[in-house]
Amino acid sequence: MSSIEASIASKPHSGMSEAEWQVRVELAACYRLVAHFGWDDLIFTHLSARVPGPEHHFLINPYGWLFDEITASSLVKVDQDGNIVDPDEKKRINPAGFTIHSAVHMAREDAGAVMHLHAADGVAVSAHAEGLLPLSQTAMLVHKHVAYHEFEGVALNLEERERLIADLGDKNVMLLRNHGTLTVGRTVPEAFIWMYFLMQACEIQVKTLACGKPHFPPQSAIETTYGQSDGLPMVANLAWRPLIRMLDRTQPSYKE
C-alpha cells in the first residue's frame, strides 16, 4: 500500500462514509501544506471541499484554528447556505470565507475543492495594474487560466457571489483584486497544484519587478507555453504523493 493510500486508509469516525473520510484527510493535508509553504494568514482564509453525495455538503476549517492544527476530524461540514451539519458547540466557521466558497461550489459542478489565500506575493500581484505577467515559465503555465474579480470589501455580501462567479467563468485560477488568490480543482490535489504554480509565479514576478525593467520572452514562446498548460492538472497526483509522504513523516496528526 502506498503512503497516500495508507494515510487515507485510517478509519473514519462512526457514521461517516469512507468517501467523506478520504476527502477530509486530503483537505486536512492541504491545510498543513499551506502552512508548510508559508501561505497561511493566522486563522483567516479558507480551503474547502465537496463531500461526495447528493446533499450539497462541504468541508471547511473551524474558525479560530491555525492551519497547522487542522485535522481530518476537526473540519466542519456545512450545507450550501453555510449552516453547520451535525452541530457541535465547539465548532464555528467564518461567514466571510464561506461566501466565496459556496458561490464557486454551487455554480461549478466540477469544483470539488476551492482554495483561497491571502499570501503576500499573491496579494501583491492581485494589486498590480497588469495582474499576472508572463515573466516566467511558471507564470506562462497558468497565465491563460487566470480570471480577475474586483475588490468589493470583506466578502460578507451574498450578492457578490453572482459577480464573482461571472468573473470566474470556467477558469480554475483567479486573482481577487487587492485581496488574494483563488483556485478550483476537481479534487484537492488539483486545486493545490493550481495554487502552487500561481504562488510560485507571483513570487517570481514580485522579485523580478524589484530588480528593475523585466525581460519578456518572445510572444511565440509565450503562446507555445500557453498551449502546454492544459496538462497541469494531470501532474497533480504525481506531485501530491510525495507531499503526503512528507506529512506522514513530519505531521502525521493531520489524518486524525
Image (cartoon, helix red, strand yellow):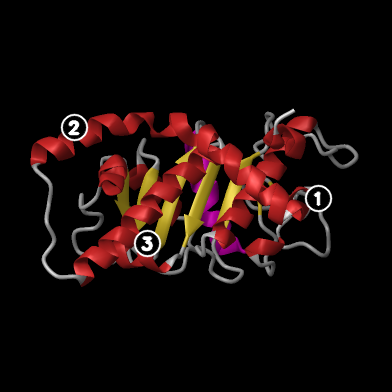
Residue 69, percent from left and from top: 71, 63
Please give the name of the residue rendered at 31% of the width and 46% of the height, measured from the top-left corner.
138
Neighbour tally class for label 1: few under 14, some 14-19, many 20 plus, Cα within 10 Å = some
Alpha carbon distance from label 2 to label 1:
44 Å
Mark 2 and mark 3 lie on one chain; the one further toward the N terminus is: 3
Amino acid carrying mark 3 in the image: Gly
**Amino acid type for the residue under numbered disc 2:** Thr
Q: Is residue 96 magenta?
A: yes
Q: Residue at x 51, y 31 (%)?
A: 109
Q: Depth-wise, is mark 2 or mark 3 nearer the camera? A: 2
Residue 202 appears at what percent x and percent y? Answer: 33, 58
Between the residue at mark 2 and the residue at mark 3, the CA separation in whole angstroms equals: 25 Å
Q: Residues within 10 Å of mark 3 (few under 14, many from 20)?
A: many
SS for tag 1?
loop
Q: Would you name the residue on which mark 2 appears? A: 224
Residue 193: mark in rendering: none
The dot on residue 256 is 1
Q: Is residue 79 left or right of residue 34?
A: right
Which stretch appears magenta?
Answer: 93-108
Could you tell me if residue 177 is visible in this image? yes
> Identity of the amino acid at label 1?
Glu
Residue located 25% across and 43% down the image: 140
The residue carrying mark 3 is 122
Q: Earlier in the sequence, mark 2 or mark 1?
A: 2
The span from disc 1 to disc 3 (Cα, nearest Å) is 31 Å
